[in-house]
């Protein structure tokens, strides 16, 4: 069975790169009937925070990328297991104690750099046949180093980058436990992947250089290494390193900006992966079609305008009932009571063609749920004038006896325009400013219908007074 994992370190929010890695891992497992597991790599106690853990869970939940494990695995809850494996490696001779002080190692590094050599541990405490080691110095707590094979090659057959070969002589003896006994990242990852039965490790390509060491440790433990897929980095649209100005934001900031979670997933999956010329995918299509044969090894480029475009396509075609909960979240976020107005689904149906985001939709829909606090100055100056006062008066009289349905309201507005010999815009625009506070709204018949007879007529009367004053 295919088993993948997403293993973030809780040192900050869930960012775009992490979310894409999680998505690729989730899709690969789901598309093969496998399992996707969530693991929290929190051994860096100084930088790991509970707030960051919560932020990661919140982002994953919003995107709908739930792990198949009942509870996430925390590395800090597995320290006993790591100590057990290290003790076994020490007993088997695949790891050893190193008593070199920080000062010694700093001096070694300086000497190597002076000779223009690659800095590396020189194996001074590495046990070898016929080698006599000095007595351990008194009062020094040793680190534990992995005894890396000193000959041969490590071959990484990356599912994205192809075959990468590492010379074992270039890999020095990695510290796997610090002098205080705490295990290091590369060691914990190996034990976790082994114990969790991970078959495919999908992660950013900044981990490529960690991979040969992890493969060696797995082999020393008698475990088969998983398959690896190292995903390229994401750049800004200008080719520079992704930053906040490009869109390097926390996932939940995209929710605040008004993105639908499904649209966010669709945009993320296309950052480096393609399926012909298809741009838009349902979640099920992503599951069925995602593979690594079509993931590019070149960096992806984040294009905010394209992200907005994808989101708009989703808003236009998604069942409004599925959009409504997210729309309600946005209304409440800006202090609007969605119970004080028309049904959310009906508003979504009228607004989604003209709004790229739910944040924009919520802002442009406030007038359906709140009393008007005023008018857009420019729109009022143009459309609420003495010239429009008789137009509004005629509308109030006609609409007062009209059936309050879009078709009847449409006929009533057109009838007023014909009676007064005006263009439709000369009638519709004063209505928009009167009922919405601005000259932009959904079609006027639907806007009036959604507002309701009492609220709409009261606003028209107030606008008529202003226009005639």
Image: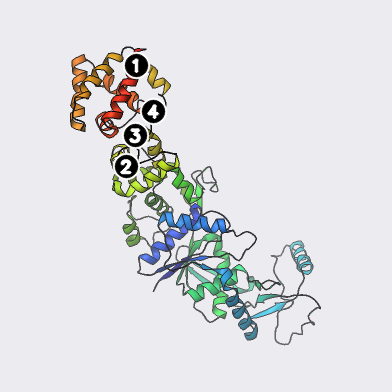
Q: Residue at x 54, y 79 (%)?
A: 219
Location of residue 101 by image quarter: bottom right
SS state under label 4:
loop
* Coordinates of residue 400 in the picture (x, y in percent): 22, 24
Q: Is residue 145 left or right of residue 160?
A: right
* Residue marked by disc 3: 368
User: Image point 20% across, 21% down: which residue?
Assistant: 398
Q: Nearer the viewer, mark 3 or mark 1?
A: 1
Q: Are marks 2 and 3 in contact (CB under 8 Å)?
A: no
Distance from Cα at disc 2 to Cα at disc 3: 10 Å
Badge nearest the viewer, 2 or 1: 1
Which quadrant would residue 380 be assigned to in this image? Answer: top left
Q: CA distance from mark 4 to mark 2?
A: 19 Å
Query: Toward the viewer: 406 or 165?
Result: 406
Q: Which residue is mark 1?
A: 465
The answer to which of marks 4 and 2 sits earlier in the sequence is 2
Farthest right residue in view:
138
Observer-side mark, 4 or 2, equals: 4
Q: Residues within 10 Å of mark 4 (few under 14, many from 20)?
A: some
- The span from disc 4 to disc 3 (Cα, nearest Å) is 9 Å
For the question of whether residue 318 can be seen, the reply is no
Say whether disc 3 or disc 1 marks the residue closer to the N-terminus: 3
**With 435 as the anchor, is 87 left or right in this view?**
right
Residue behind mark 2:
344
* Count of numbered circles on the image: 4
Q: Give whichever of 97, 63 is nearer the camera.
A: 63
Quick check: marks 4 and 3 in contact, CB under 8 Å?
A: no
| First of labels 2, 3 by sequence position | 2
As drawn, is 37 to the left or to the right of 460? right
Label 1: few (<14), some (14–19) or many (≥20) C-alpha neighbours in 10 Å: some
């Amino acid at each position: 069975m295919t088993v993948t994992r997403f293993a973030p370190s809780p040192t900050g929010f869930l960012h775009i790169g992490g979310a894409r890695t999680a998505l690729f891992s989730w899709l690969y497992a789901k598309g093969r009937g496998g399992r996707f597991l969530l693991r929290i790599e929190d051994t860096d106690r100084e930088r790991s925070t509970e707030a960051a853990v919560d932020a990661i869970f919140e982002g994953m939940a919003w995107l709908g990328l739930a792990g198949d494990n009942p509870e996430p695995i925390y590395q800090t809850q597995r320290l006993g297991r790591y100590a057990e494996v290290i003790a076994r490696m020490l007993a088997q001779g695949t790891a050893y104690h190193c008593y070199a002080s920080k000062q010694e190692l700093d001096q070694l590094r300086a000497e190597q750099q002076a000779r223009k050599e690659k800095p590396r541990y020189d194996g001074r405490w590495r046990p070898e046949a016929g080698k006599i080691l000095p007595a351990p110095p008194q009062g020094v707590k040793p680190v534990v180093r992995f005894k890396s094979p000193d000959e041969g090659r490590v071959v990484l057959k990356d599912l994205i980058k192809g075959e990468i070969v590492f010379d074992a002589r270039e890999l020095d003896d990695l510290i796997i436990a610090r002098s205080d006994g705490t295990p290091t990242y590369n060691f914990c990852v190996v034990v976790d992947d082994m114990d969790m039965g991970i078959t495919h490790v999908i992660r950013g390509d900044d981990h490529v250089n960690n991979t040969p060491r992890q493969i060696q440790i797995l082999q020393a433990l008698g475990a088969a290494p998983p398959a690896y897929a190292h995903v390229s980095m994401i750049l800004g649209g200008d080719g520079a390193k992704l930053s906040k100005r490009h869109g390097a934001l926390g996932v939940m900031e995209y929710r605040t900006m008004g993105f639908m979670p499904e649209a966010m997933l669709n945009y993320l999956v296309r950052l480096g992966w393609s399926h012909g010329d298809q741009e838009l995918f349902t979640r099920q299509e992503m599951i069925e079609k995602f593979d690594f044969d079509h993931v590019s090894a070149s960096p992806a480029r984040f294009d905010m305008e394209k992200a907005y475009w994808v989101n708009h396509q989703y808003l236009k075609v998604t069942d409004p009932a599925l959009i409504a909960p997210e729309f309600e979240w946005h209304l409440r976020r800006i202090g609007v009571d969605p119970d004080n107005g028309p049904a959310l689904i009906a508003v979504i149906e009228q607004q989604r063609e003209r709004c790229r985001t739910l944040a924009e939709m919520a802002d442009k829909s406030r007038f359906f749920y709140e009393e008007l606090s005023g008018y857009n100055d420019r729109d009022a100056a143009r459309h609420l004038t003495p010239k429009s006062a008789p137009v509004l008066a005629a509308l109030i009289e006609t609409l007062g006896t009209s059936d309050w349905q879009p078709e009847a309201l449409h006929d009533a507005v057109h009838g007023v325009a014909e009676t007064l010999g005006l263009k439709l815009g000369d009638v519709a625009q004063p209505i928009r400013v009167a009922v919405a506070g601005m000259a932009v709204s959904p079609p006027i018949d639907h806007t009036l219908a959604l507002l309701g007879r009492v609220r709409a007529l009261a606003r028209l009367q107030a606008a008529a007074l202003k226009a005639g004053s």
